[in-house]
Image (cartoon, rainbow, N blue to C red):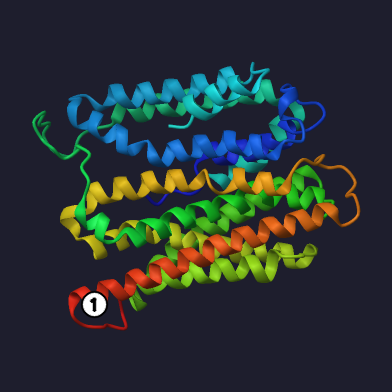
Amino acid sequence: MTTTYPPSQLRLTEAADFYTSSSTNIPAARNNDAVVSLVGTLGYGLTWSGGIFVNPLMSRFANLRILTLLGAVVMSLGLFLAGYSTTLWQLFLTQSILYGVGGLIMAPVIQLLLDKYGVRRTLQILAGWNVAVGIPVAAVVKRRRAFDPNSDAGRVRLNMALVKRGTFALGALLQAAGNSIPIYYLSAYSISVLSYSSSTGSLFLAINSAVNSVSRILMGVLADGVGRQNTLITAAFLSSLAVFALWYDAARPRFIAFIIVYGIYAGGYNALIPTTITEIYGVENYTRVNGAIYFIRGLGSLLGAPVAGLILGTHSRGAAVPGDALKGRFERVVVYDGVLLLCAGLCVSYVRWLDARDKGRWKWKA
């Protein structure tokens, strides 16, 4: 998995300003960042963790096009129905569960649609886009190997390698939790604390996603030279450093620097997980361990933005900042995020030591 931020996460981030505003179509979501971010992270988590349930289905369906088409239809239906939601449970059912199974372009486009048409029409347009893109994709999906209904490739089993390297899984969980927080609160911080416009907040999110995408390629090149585990560790620690040094108590210039720098380091970590799994667990264990790791990362996302929303509390987006109170609450969110990423770095560092110990020798490039 080397994709950028899942579309559900980006789209909920853009819609969050509307859902929590005074003009929201869901009164219970007004000024409630914790609940609204939970809607997004639930869909985001299902996007990551759903593979552990879908893989067994894929191993038992001869025609993958049916599954792919079904997924596209269900996702589109979730977005379409979310436009008619008036209560939180309806939003959870549609935008979180049904949908959650190009940030550069999508963030500003979604903000433009929200400003011009409102949330209902925007979600309907996105639903139509999903169908238009999903059907052609479903039509060309093919299996790489001949279908074998008796194969155990997709069956879920407890893998002892994963148990022995549980620290790597813990690091993946903590990094996923920490990684989700800036994505959800970049826009809120820029609007509510730094008094930028909502369109500028969307632009910041797009820039971060673009940098993240480029970083995945460059970090892969770097990893070839200095080692995947070394690059993963460095990315985790520098992500934490960026949060503490550039986001905490950030004025406008330092916040812009954070958007770029964090996009570089976070992108590197996310891109290197699959290849690092192969190196630590072995190619023969990749399929099962990869599914388990991404399931764990899906769970980790639920510890990030929703808990940060509870720390932040309620506030009116775009309203005048009440003294330093709101900024102080954001600083606590930043500390929470930085600690999560720091602990993720410590976990992968420990795994690096374990891997060298088990292989009987230390190599600087690993």
Is 2 situated above or below 130? Answer: below
Give coordinates of residue 204: x percent, y percent. 68, 53
- Residue 125 seen in the current view: yes
Depth check, front residue: 84 or 288: 288
Is 105 situated above or below 349? Answer: above
333 on left or right of 293: right
Give coordinates of residue 145: x percent, y percent. 13, 38
- Residue 262: quarter of image: bottom right
- Residue 117 seen in the current view: no
Give coordinates of residue 168: x percent, y percent. 35, 61
- Point 29% across, 61% down: residue: 165
Q: How many marks?
A: 1
Q: Which corner quadrant holds the C terminus?
A: bottom left
Give coordinates of residue 28: x percent, y percent. 72, 25
- Residue 340: quarter of image: bottom right
- Point 66% across, 39% down: residue: 34
Classify mark 1: residues with Cα within 10 Å, few (<14), some (14-19) or many (20+).
few
47 on left or right of 287: right
- Point 40% across, 57% down: residue: 170
Residue placed under numbered mark 1 in the picture: 357
Mark 1: amino acid: Arg
- Point 36% across, 56% down: residue: 169
Find numbered disc 1 in the image and state the secondary structure of the residue it sits on.
Answer: helix
Is 356 situated above or below 29? Answer: below
